[in-house]
Image (cartoon, rainbow, N blue to C red):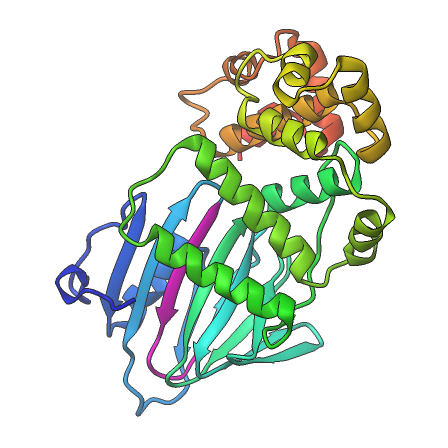
Amino acid sequence: MKLKEELHSEANDDSSPSADAELFRTRDIEQARDWGTRTFCENELRNIDVRGELDARLMYRKYGSIGIGRMSYGGELRIRPTTFDDFYLVQVPLSGGEHITNGNQSVSSSPTVGSILNAGQQHEIVHTTGTEKLILRIDRGLVERLCGQHLGNDAQTRVEFDTAMPLDSAAGRRWASTMQWLFDYLDGTPSSSPLLAAQIEHMIGSLLLVSQASNHSLALNEDRSRSVTPAFIRKAEIFIEERAHEPITVGTIAEHVGVSTSSLYTGFRKYRNTSPMHLLKSIRLNRVREQLLKSDPRNTTVTAVAYQWGFAHLGHFTTYYKRWFGETPSETLAR
């Protein structure tokens, strides 16, 4: 996709990025750093080749728990982002390449080798001249929640991916083409329905888990090879995910997927090692956390958010929440 000249923000433009789409082009390194901070996290940019000309560009669109973009810096730079705790960053070079270090680990990225920057780790990126890449920001909570669901437990499961992502394998090519599809799909498209957004988030997060090696790859592969999950289980999970804000019951779920409540309970116990209502509670707890993290404590209360997501007994809710996330909801809101 070509960047449209009439929409470029030049170096003297102080406008803020919009909520849905961000597009900038600048030759000023401080403005490029500022846009990177607004979109991702605090970062340090430094020109390596002082003779090279900076031409930083970013097209980025946020969509629920994911964000997709296409970016380049033109010249050769060293990028040192601060440690980010709440998202993973997937990078697929379209041209050129980058050298990424993470502690003692080093990866040379290219159009045949992508990369994933894990949440909670410190990275340094050397971006070579002429490099352009697709980038995907995906919320850590979404990935860890999906991983827990696939493994059959109720809680978020910490996920740590390998930094190097082979793009010349079948799985790598499938992932790269999916990122390109998502970028093209969201280009110039207004925000769609929450239902569709939830389905796309689920697809992208699940595809990342099965496409890229991680600390749970063996368990995820064993889970898939051990037995084929009945279609009604997946249909029920999607229904619960999309209707978590509604007062749904086990009977409602069973009726939607076309099985009896006993069959629904049996299926969830066998294939997910949980129950439909435990899954609903875990999703609602994660939604509460997401809302608290985004809210201003001056205008929001824990009680109001808990009630909104169906937790009528505040004492029980606080106990569940602390067990899930290791902190009280008030501590989350105060962040």
**Residue 133, located in which quarter of the rendered image?**
bottom left
**Is residue 190 depicted above or below 11 in this figure?**
above
**Residue 286, located in which quarter of the rendered image?**
top right
> What range is drawn magenta here?
66-77
**Residue at point 78% right, 51% down?**
220
Residue 86 in view of the camera: no
From the viewer's perspective, tell me whether residue 193 is left or right of residue 291: left
Residue 70 in view of the camera: yes
**Residue at point 67% right, 34% down?**
234
Give how far across and how far down residue 66 sits, in percent.
Answer: 48, 48
Give how far across and how far down residue 142 sits, in percent.
Answer: 59, 42
From the viewer's perspective, tell me whether residue 140 is left or right of residue 179: right
Q: Is residue 123 magenta?
A: no
Give how far across and how far down residue 104 sits, in percent.
Answer: 71, 76
**Residue at point 59% right, 24% down?**
330
**Is residue 136 depicted above or below 205 in this figure?**
below
Per the picture, the main secondary structure of the magenta-coloured stretch is strand
The residue lying toward the viewer, choosing from 249 and 256, is 256
The residue lying toward the viewer, choosing from 222 and 135, is 222
